[in-house]
Amino acid sequence: MTPSFREILQALNHHEVEYIVVGGVAAVIHGAPTTTFDLDTLVRLSDANAERLARALSELDARFREHQTNIHPTVEDILGGGHLLLMTRAGPLDVLGFIGEQQRYEDLLGESSEIGTSMGPLRVLNLEALIAEKKRMGRAKDIAAVELLEEVLRHQKPLG
């Protein structure tokens, strides 16, 4: 895991944000030999968690990637439940209110595992669920990743 992803995850953990690591970083954590350029997190959409996340994002100097000017995400943006594509001082971070077919944090909590790390606990989407999401998305890059992820699954030891 890159130092930038570590810094972002440490900030999220420091502020006790409820999130699940999904996407490419989840694949890497499961042992997939792949590269990813951003950290995708599925967050719980509650007032308290949005407040904690806003504090973490402020600490990371997060701003929207698609804007020329520095526009920083607010609690209202987080509670909007969409996809916040952010750049932090530690690198790119996608804060997702849902993935796949409108699956939210609560929907996938049971399909994730908590692992202990030097940064504190990380909740990561299980490999089977990650494969299912990649298949559902159907984009060329996701379809290409499915075969690799299925090979990792065949040789996987349980997380934790």
Image (cartoon, helix red, strand yellow):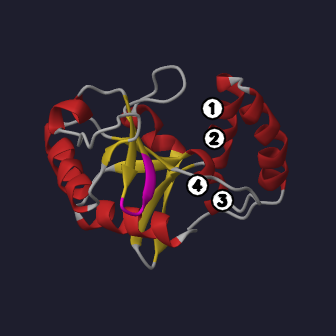
Label 1 SS = helix
Whether label 2 touches label 3, CB < 8 Å: no
Instruction: Give neighbour class at mark 2: few <14, some 14-19, many 20+ (Cα, 10 Å).
Output: many
Query: Is tag 4's residue or tag 2's residue first in the polypeptide sequence?
Result: 4
Q: Which residue is mark 3?
A: 28
Instruction: Give neighbour class at mark 1: few <14, some 14-19, many 20+ (Cα, 10 Å).
Output: some
**Is 39 situated left or right of 33 in this image?**
left
- Residue type at mark 2 is Leu
Alpha carbons under labels 3 and 1: distance apart: 16 Å
Asked whether 99 or 121 is in front, the reply is 99
Query: Is tag 4's residue or tag 1's residue first in the polypeptide sequence?
Result: 4
Q: Which residue is mark 4?
A: 25
Alpha carbons under labels 3 and 4: distance apart: 5 Å
Residues in magenta? 89-93
Asked whether 153 or 11 is in front, the reply is 11
Query: Is tag 3's residue or tag 1's residue first in the polypeptide sequence?
Result: 3
